[in-house]
């Protein structure tokens, strides 16, 4: 009998399948790990934006977490959209007891520009969850929120990465530079003080719905398999580049990426 590593995602939904726990489960499957999902919010969204959000009652959230943790222990955990302070506090109690890798995608704003969580939730995220994370995966706008300043160039990104590590006690930080001009460069700030960059060509496309979810989910899958943070981020970078390059061009807005084309490492 072959053993599958197990990855758990805790986030919001996307009925159009491009983001949230739907994208995470596709990414886990693509990377050969068994995926589990706990829904925090039911989100009515598609490639054109977010139409409505229903944050789930804390009772059903807690019951979902109990169902998972009492039966199948994950080898790695990822969190995405955590819209309410109570959700973050509930989750922190579980994560404090876990020793497996934890990937925190600080989801604050959708690709469409729609804000997804309250300012109070942002503050709770900083205080309760960032110190518990193995790695966090902010894009430039999210890194600006955490750093408190605009990030206009690479020098500012280097300062921000180091500051976020020191200020919040985060072990590893990868700042995704997809919003920068020129190349698509990501900056990985490691626990040992080293900084590593991952660069790919910029792909001219509007089809980037769910890229942040997918990127963090691939990191989670690789960590579940026992790979290092550097290896996991490298695989995620190659995966998302190919996924964007081969996007299926679905929907009338920012379409989803292709979760099945990357076959490397």
Image: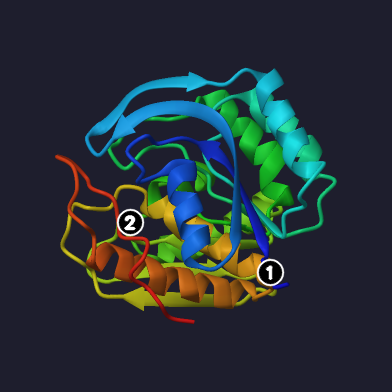
* Image x and y of residue 106, in percent: 53, 44
Identify which residue is drawn at 51% across, 77% down. Answer: 196
Task: Give the crowd class for mark 1: few <14, some 14-19, many >=20 residues within 10 Å.
Answer: some
Circle number at residue 218 = none
**CB atoms at circles 1 and 2 under 8 Å apart?**
no
* Image x and y of residue 30, in percent: 46, 65
Q: Which residue is mark 2?
A: 152
Q: Which residue is mark 1?
A: 191
Camera-nearest residue between 236 and 131: 236
Q: Earlier in the sequence, mark 1 or mark 2?
A: 2
Give the vertical position of 70 relative to 265 (above or below).
above
Give the vertical position of 36 relative to 27 (above or below).
above
Camera-nearest residue between 144 and 113: 113
Q: Is residue 19 visible?
A: yes
Q: Is residue 114 visible?
A: no
The quarter holding residue 180 reads: bottom left
Element type at mark 2:
loop
């Amino acid at each position: 009998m072959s053993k599958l590593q197990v990855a758990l995602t805790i986030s919001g939904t996307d009925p159009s399948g491009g983001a949230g726990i739907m994208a995470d489960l596709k990414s886990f499957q693509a990377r050969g790990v068994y995926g589990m999902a706990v829904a925090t919010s039911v989100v009515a969204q598609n490639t054109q934006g977010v139409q409505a959000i229903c944050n789930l009652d804390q009772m059903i959230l807690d019951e979902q977490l109990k169902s998972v943790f009492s039966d199948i222990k994950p080898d790695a955990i990822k969190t995405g959209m955590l819209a309410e302070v109570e959700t973050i506090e509930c989750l922190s109690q579980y994560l404090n007891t876990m020793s497996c890798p934890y990937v925190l995608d600080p989801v604050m704003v959708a690709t469409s520009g729609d804000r997804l969580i309250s300012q109070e939730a942002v503050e709770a995220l900083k205080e309760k969850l960032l110190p518990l994370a193995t790695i966090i995966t902010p894009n430039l706008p999210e890194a600006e929120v955490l750093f408190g300043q605009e990030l206009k160039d690479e020098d500012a990104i280097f300062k921000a990465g180091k500051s976020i590590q020191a200020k919040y006690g985060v072990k590893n930080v990868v700042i995704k530079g997809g919003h920068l001009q020129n190349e698509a460069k990501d900056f990985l700030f490691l626990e040992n003080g080293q900084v590593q960059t991952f660069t790919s060509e910029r792909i001219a496309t509007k089809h980037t719905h769910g890229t942040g979810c997918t990127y963090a989910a691939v990191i989670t899958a690789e960590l579940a398999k026992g790979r290092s943070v550097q290896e996991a981020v490298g695989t995620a970078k190659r995966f998302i580049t190919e996924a964007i390059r081969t996007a299926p061009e679905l929907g009338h807005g920012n379409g989803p990426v292709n979760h099945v084309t990357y076959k490397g490492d």
